[in-house]
Amino acid sequence: MNLLGKRILLIVSGGIAAYKALELVRLLRGAGCGVTCVLSRAAGHFVTPLSLQALSESRVYTDLFSLTDESEMGHIQLSRAADLLVVAPASADLLARMATGLADDLAATVLLATDKPVLVAPAMNVRMWQHPATVANMATLAARGVQVVGPDEGAMACNEFGPGRLAEPPAILAAITALLAPAPGPLAGKHALVTSGPTHEPIDPVRYIANRSSGRQGNAIAAALAALGARVTLVRGPVTVPDPAGVTVVRVETAQQMLDACLDALPADIAVCAAAVADWRVASAASGKIKKSPGAPPPMLDLVPNPDILALLSAPRPDRPRLVVGFAAETDALDENAAAKRLRKGCDWIVANDVSPATGIMGGEDNTVHLVTAAGIEDWPRLPKTEVAQRLAARIAATLA
Ligand SMILES: Cc1cc2nc3c(=O)[nH]c(=O)nc-3n(C[C@H](O)[C@H](O)[C@H](O)COP(=O)(O)O)c2cc1C
């Protein structure tokens, strides 16, 4: 993995984590990158151009309307001269301006004018991150191919807890490396399709049927396959865990949207269906909020089956992935149910996990899985979901070798 000679345009925006951009510049310089910094209009309140200039050993750009800057390095040239644009930290405001296509300061203008890949590292208060406006902006940016690293979950400067902390500079460096100098791993040249998270099936505009899937396991599998060199498309339902860096993320809400996105992503060599797809949806979701009237009985929900994504991807077809892996979350008779599911769905492997409440596994950090293949059933020990993902990715690589 070599970043020597790569050119990074680092855009720093106005958030409390801007001081960490200094550490990122130091790491990038240490890795042999040339770094040019641009400050958004608010960034100068949090970090000085002088510090960035000293560490990057390059001129720092702040002003869209600077006559000297424009004559030496115009904003269009600035946006094209790098191999990658990195926005770290990416404030809620700059992400919104990117999603809307605004060009009202140098940072936003460069981001709109560029023809180079863009990686953003969001950092903000948890409520700002979870606000529907930010969620919609991130979905828009992801759909346009903007890559995302973080945010991390943890204690925040504002004394709140949750997702919103800037990814640590080494993790941002790793995401940059994955984009600019991917390791030629054993899955290089292979395309992996991974589904993750729950689906939400609307009842009316404000209510939906859901489940407790966190998306952690599917996201970890997408990251592990990408780390082995696969090109990964992650189709994921509504989750709050961060998207893995270096994979193409398609955000969906319902089972039907997930199926459509999976079919759009084909052909693939590998499909890992880790999403907890709702089995049923309401036959016809109400167009307005269903009102609760005093004395009236609760509404009856008329449920119909959702498409079976695993069975459809497993069915014989010219573009069937060579290896289709399903997940079975069971609360009883785990091995028998999982083995029967493998045959019923026509997939190659089933990763079965016991999600009975006593295990605390659904939505948690660990997983105890059984790998069901045509050769039999393997019991894996209780492991963090990241390690389950790495083991599974290594098995997939060995099988496709
Ligand atoms: C002390 C302080 C800390 C802030 N931290 C953040 C932050 O971490 N993330 C964020 O999105 N906005 C934060 N803001 C708000 C942004 O600075 C504000 O939205 C600004 O307009 C962003 O401008 P930009 O688009 O140039 O980044 C903070 C504001 C203040 C006063």
Image: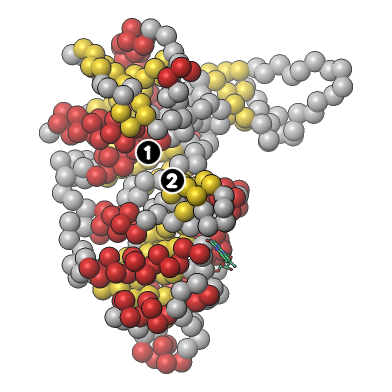
Q: Position of residue 100 (x, y in %)?
A: 56, 62
Determine the residue positioned at 38% across, 78% down: 51
- Label 1 amino acid? Asn
Which residue is disc 1 drawn over? Answer: 219
Callout 1: CB less than 8 Å from ligand 1: no
Residue 149, above or below 84: above
Numbered circle sitting on residue 249: none
| For residue 344, above or below residue 199 | above
Between 29 and 255, the one nearer to me in the picture = 29
Question: Dot 1 surroundings within 10 Å: few (below 14), some, or many (20 or more)?
Answer: many
Q: Residue furthest left?
A: 401
Instruction: Determine the residue positioned at 42% across, 88% down.
Output: 70
- On the rendering, which quadrant does ligand 1 occupy? bottom right
Whether residue 58 is situated above or below residue 239 in the rendered picture: below
What secondary structure is found at the residue carrying circle 1? helix
Amino acid type indicated by mark 2: Pro
Is mark 2 in CB contact (under 8 Å) with mark 1?
A: yes
Q: CA distance from mark 2 to mark 1?
A: 8 Å
Estimate the x, y position of residue 380 in percent, counting from the top left. 26, 21
Judged left or right of residue 389, residue 158 is: right
Residues 61 and 300: in front is: 61
Res. 302 visible in picture:
yes
User: Which structural element holds mark 2?
Assistant: loop
Q: Which residue is mark 2?
A: 242
Local crowd size for mark 2, using a 10 Å CA cut-off: few (<14), some (14–19), many (≥20) = some
Coordinates of residue 91 in the picture (x, y in percent): 51, 62
Residue occupying the point 76% across, 28% down = 290
Task: Give the quadrant of residue 270.
Answer: top left
